[in-house]
Amino acid sequence: MHGVIEKAHRNVEHTKELSSQDINATSTGSVVVNRLVSSVSGITFLGLPAEIYSYGTQIWMFLISAVILGIVMHFVYLPVFHDMQLTSCFSYLELRFDRIVRLTASFVYALSTLFFIPVVIYVPALAFSQVSGVNLHLITPILCVICIFYTTVGGLRAVVWADTIQFLLMLVAIFAIIALGLIDIGGVSEVWTRAQRGGRLIWFDFDPNPTLRTSFWSVTLGLTTNWIVIFGINQACIQRFLAVPTRKAAKNSLKIYIIGLMVINSLACFIGLLVYAKYESCDPVSTQQVKKLDQIVPFYVMDAGGRIPGLPGLFIAGVFSAALSTMSSGLNTLAGTIYEDFIRPCRPHASEQSSSTAMKVIVVFLGFIVIVLVFVVEKLGSIIQMAISCTGVISGSILGMFTMGMVSTRANTKGVVSGVVASISCMITLWISALGKLNYQFLPFRSDGCEEDIFTPSAMNRTTSLVPPTSEEELPFIFRISFMYYALIGVLIFTAVAYPISLLTGGGKVIDQRLLTPFARSKSESKISVQLCVKNGAEQLLNGETKDKP
């Protein structure tokens, strides 16, 4: 609906308005909400509770990851982007290195987004299938078509306002589920007691074994590396934070965003404890009432809240809203990146209407690719494992490019491109080799409190309770490393290749100290010569993409 209204309000969108001016035309509050809700997908609603239910609360240590993310963004990355006032984070790489690095980064970003969006869409389809019984493969195309429609018709402004409305639905759904669970179980203390009794409260597992699914180290080191890219250094995030007029406002927006990220994800984790407390003595997966653990939350909503009219629908609306917001923002940003970096240089004199049409065609094309990929990701394991591994194989190289560019004056194009190729090649090899073979034992489940009539014949014949199948052949150690470390390994490989090659090929040259993070900048260079150099270089490279510094 909002897409149609925006189309009637404005028939032609400028290409650059899709990337920046549309955001600036929208209120700052809506932009912050948009960034937050785009970061909180259906993975949060279904994946995190299922993770807590199956493996305990160790992943809740993402609170530390969020704090580190805020600190790193505040002191390292955000000052550079805000000082340069670039509407595209990839424009930074062109200024710091050259166009080859920018195109490399754009390609890597496109690959990462296309890996991630199918996972996001799979989640609500899985939930709706559990609640309604409708075939998963029928739901997915319908959901994608709806998202493609309002993204192409209404543009980014429609996406921003639709996300704001969807965010409210998400909050209502979360609090309704939590309130229902607390009333049913008997309060927070009882939930905590049952979780403790079931061994779900795991906070500080300091075992350094890298093959463990989750430990304190895998979350605070591995997940943090991934989060810096997903929630910090990406096109959508930079666009939103630069929509505010001053660096102080941008940093305040960052603080609000980090707090919101921590709160919403923590609420999702608490839902996982609620669900465990509800089924402490009668696990619905053991009785085969639920086919996949990732469907445990929809089952809980139907089981505990089905008697309340509208609650299952509210839950589905929340999950769908989260997925649609992430998919729409991702498609819009990805389409803008592809057009600006790969298509516009081939048609520099295209009219605004022609550019707008091209952008919409790209969104539709990407949407159909996503539909096809959804049928692939459903075979890749649990929701959390899918999401973190799919993004982790690419995140390391993206983080490496920006970090090396901002902290090192010796990095150059040959080193950076070599590092990207090495990192992605190694990580995709690692990921594919371990695909379907990383099986982790669940924490114990109980079914001794179930009534006999709910057991299916096959469930009664089970000799074990939900122990994932193990491979007959022992995987080599390198392939058994937890998927939580993929992003960290990727950035280490990138650095190990990029820096030495940069040194061996003559090092690099920084034309403007603002391209470096504040603590890496030289204080001795002439500000006048730097400003003149950058003014001329930026105008030629960005073709008007830079904005006047406030």
Image: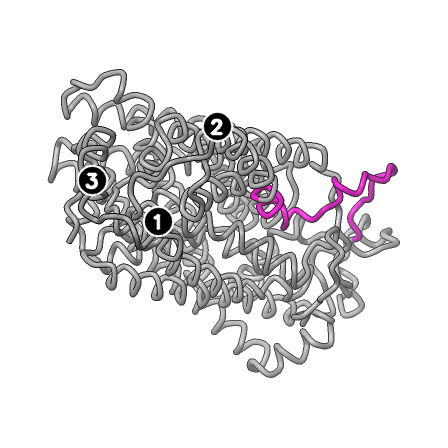
- Asked if residue 31 lies left or right of residue 137, the reply is left
Residue at figure coordinates x 30%, y 34% from the top left: 149
Q: Categorize mark 3 by other alpha carbons within 10 Å: few (<14), some (14-19), many (20+).
A: some
Residue bearing the label numbered 1 = 237
Of the residues tagged 2 and 1, which is closer to the observer? 2
Residue type indicated by callout 3: Thr
Which region of the structure is painted magenta? Answer: 467-491
Coloration of the structure image: one colour
In depth, the one of 449 and 55 nearer the eye is 55
- How far from the left and from the top, in percent, is residue 452? 79, 63
- How far from the left and from the top, in percent, is residue 4? 20, 38
Q: Are marks 2 and 3 in contact (CB under 8 Å)?
A: no
| Quarter of the image with the C terminus in it | bottom left
Residue at figure coordinates x 49%, y 46% from the top left: 124
**Disc ID at residue 426:** none
| Distance from the alpha carbon under mark 2 to that under mark 3 | 26 Å
Mark with earlier residue (2, 1): 1
In depth, the one of 133 and 427 nearer the eye is 427
Q: Categorize mark 2 by other alpha carbons within 10 Å: few (<14), some (14-19), many (20+).
A: many
Can you say whether 419 is above or below 272 in the image?
A: above
Residue at figure coordinates x 21%, y 47% from the top left: 23
| Quarter of the image with the N terminus in it | top left
What secondary structure is found at the residue carrying circle 3? loop
- How far from the left and from the top, in percent, is residue 535? 18, 38
Can you say whether 260 is above or below 89 in the image?
A: below
Residue bearing the label numbered 2 = 414
Of the residues tagged 1 and 3, which is closer to the observer? 3
Mark with earlier residue (1, 3): 1
| One can see residue 32 in this view | yes
Q: Quadrant of residue 285?
A: bottom right
In depth, the one of 235 and 414 nearer the eye is 414
Residue bearing the label numbered 3 = 546
